Image (cartoon, rainbow, N blue to C red):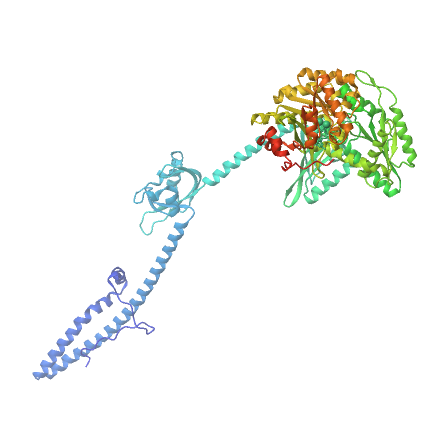
Amino acid sequence: MRKGKQPPRISRHDGRPNRTRFTATQTMTSDRNDKERPPQAVFGAIGHEADAAAIERLRERAAQALDSGRFDLADELLAGVDGQEIQLAKLVENLRIYQAELEIQNEELQLSQRHAQDAFARFSAFFNNLPLAGLVIDRQGLIKETNQRARTLFGLRNRPGHQHFFARLIADTDRGEVIHAWSSLAGDQPRELAELHFQTLEGDRFIGDLHLATLPGILDDAPTYICAVLDRTESARQRRALAEATERLRRSESFLNATGEIAKVGGWEMDVPTGRVRWTDVTYRIHDLPPSEDPPLALALGFFHPDDRQLLEHRIERAIARAEAYDLQLRMTTAAGREIWVQTTCQPICEDDRVTKLQGTIQDISHLKRSEEQLEFLAHHDPLTGLANRSLFRARLELCLQRAARNGTQVALLFLDLDRFKYVNDSLGHSVGDQLLERVAAALAAQVRSSDTIARLGGDEFVVIMDDVGKPRFAARFARRLLGVLDQPFATETRELYITASIGISIYPEDGADMDTLLRHADIAMYRAKENGRNGFNFYEPAMSAGAAERLRMEHELRGALARSEMMLHYQPQVALSDCSLRGVEALCRWQHPRLGLVAPDQFIPVAEDSGLIGELTAWVLEQACRQLILWDQVGFRIPRLAVNLPMREIERTDLVNRVRRTLERTGLAPDRLELEVTESMIMRRPDVAITTLDALRALGVILALDDFGTGHSSLTYLKRLPLNRLKMDKSFVERLGEDRDDEAIARAVIALGRSVGLGVIAEGIETRTQHDFLRRELCEEGQGYLYGRPLAAGAFMESWSMIEGSARLSAARSASAPEPEPEPEPKS
Ligand code: C2E
Ligand code: MG
Ligand code: MG
């Protein structure tokens, strides 16, 4: 019944099904395990097959013995079979146990193999990712293993598969040292070699540290060596950079010292915990001290002005307590007793959040302070007279008014203008004018109390502020005193001069609550003093304001008008009465006022004359008009003659002739195309001077016309002596031609007079055909007036006249039906 029975399957102790099988790959392991197995077990396993066959043979022989009736033999044989079976069962049992042990051992073996593999993988990863270059070399020095960093650092990855000697990676200079260290490695004692020169396979050099250690061989294996290389290039570079920076610092420090010497900037340092002070040589020099021991803090501070010293001590305390820098300008007295200004700076130095040092500079800035004071003086004083200028005057007056408002006191403002000062300037020259101003200023200033202010506002205008004047009559008394001071000759370079002044007085608060009103009213009162015959004074009265204020304002605005290009010229045609052909143009000045619009010359020319602006204005008109004529020439619009009005006093100016000549030269206008218009009253003021000037102008080739003829009182004697070319009959006689017999008689007489003294005659203000016809009949040669054209700006003038010429124009434009050409806006007068 046991025949064919399979041995039970072997289970593990825990009863789980056994999954372990020997495989081909585990042959080695099983071989190795065989060595450890007891020899009987192996024998048992082989004998098991043989015994089964022997038992089978015994059974067959017992069966044959039974069949042949040999029972005893059959029993004997069957007993052998039983014994063998028992033995076999034991053997099988033993085998089972061995097999179970074997499988357990096999499992443990596999587990530890996995651990080993795991550990190896981790070590490989660690080795590969080390920031150090790791190389394993054998006893011959051949590189066996490398990590990632080593391959990168030495360029080994570029030549995989090549065998390299580690020594090849060390620069010649250091190779010997490394080989020596390597060969003398003892036991597990590693060696460190710092700052060696390595080289890559490409030949690039770098500096690194080397760590050498022996890796003991397993069993009989020969030992290998681990070489760890730390690339020091970066830190070496940093160290080099640090050394260079230190050297640079040292050099710039000495440079700083040198520049400090040159720039005279001293240095100082204070050690906060000890209070020790150090100075540079320049600092000693600033203090007028020889360089010596460190000065005690108290001594260092003792040089400063007592007031400034307090401030300095306060700032030093703050610098220490709050790490606050400072930059101060302070007064001090040096050891030699010099009073100087210094600029001192301070920079706190912190360590561990505490101020441990103060460092700073000190510089003698006395010269700077002096020029600052000079600048300050210049900014507030008139350079010619040294008196307060307009800005200081305003500041002082402002203060006075505030004080007076608080205290309920009065302030007097005296506005003083020299009489006819312009003539001194014009006739004797500016240098004499300046000298006179200087002397007068000094004389006036000597009369002024220290609590009062005298200022020069410009030109020949002075103003005195009398603070707390008490009673207005004190101001009157003072004005009289000032006028009295002028009652003496003033010596200039060339001669002694007498001058008078006119004074206007305004009183705060009666005549004005603010500075500008007071000033304006004092000025108006001064004008009134001038009108009253000069060399006197006037208190302001409200009745004076009406005209004077506007005039004053205009004068102020006129000053900037040229600069702001507010002046312009209009041109009015002068025609031949015979055919109305264009004979000339008269340039007439206009002021394009930002507030008032187009202002007529009657309004501003007298203001310009009074304020001394007329010279500049005339020069501009002359230049502008001459240029315009040339421009018209250039575009083929030819006008034979240009008339320009000369202002009242221009003719008395010595340089007029030269100025005219220079203008002609500059603009290229022929002199005989320029006609200058003068008036009778201009000539009659100072006939001799006028005649000299006119002669010189004639000699220049310029044409001269007597403007507004008939309105003045020129005597015929003078008329004959004047080098004139033309008379301009005033429009007042033209106005009523054809209506007023008297005017007609005058017109006839003027024309006859002109003819008799050989002068051309032009009639002004022709507005009607009747006037034109009358004058033409009387053989007046030329005419000017709205009938032919209103004054127009250059562009409009050319447009209007270049299209229609001469008589064609007259018949076209002046026939009863024809409309007037569109006039430019008429100026207000
Ligand atoms: P003026 O030299 O006698 O100039 C003629 C004035 O008569 C001009 O006045 C002109 O516009 C005006 N007028 C011309 N035709 C007629 C007319 O048909 N009817 C009327 N009612 N008036 C006519 P404007 O331009 O206002 O000039 C006035 C004065 O101002 C000029 O008189 C001249 O003495 C002076 N003036 C003009 N421009 C200048 C200049 O640039 N410099 C100087 N110093 N004075 C100038
Ligand atoms: Mg004129
Ligand atoms: Mg005129």
Where the N terminus falls, by quadrant?
A: bottom left
Give residue 742's position: percent from left, percent from top. 78, 28
At which x and y percent is residue 31? 25, 61
> Number of marks in the image?
0
In the picture as drawn, the residue positioned furthest to the left comes out as 68
Instruction: Tell me if residue 453 can be seen.
Output: no
Q: Which quadrant holds residue 725?
A: top right
Give x and y (percent) for residue 613.
Answer: 73, 28
- 564 sits left or right of 61 in the view: right
Q: Is residue 156 visible?
A: yes
- Residue 607 on image: x %, y %: 76, 31
Q: Quadrant of ligand 3?
A: top right
**Foreground residue among 528 and 158:** 528
Q: Quadrant of residue 489?
A: top right
Front position in the image: 10 or 762: 762
Q: Give residue 666's quadrant in the image.
A: top right
Q: Nearer the viewer, residue 495 or 807?
A: 807
Quadrant occupied by the C terminus: top right
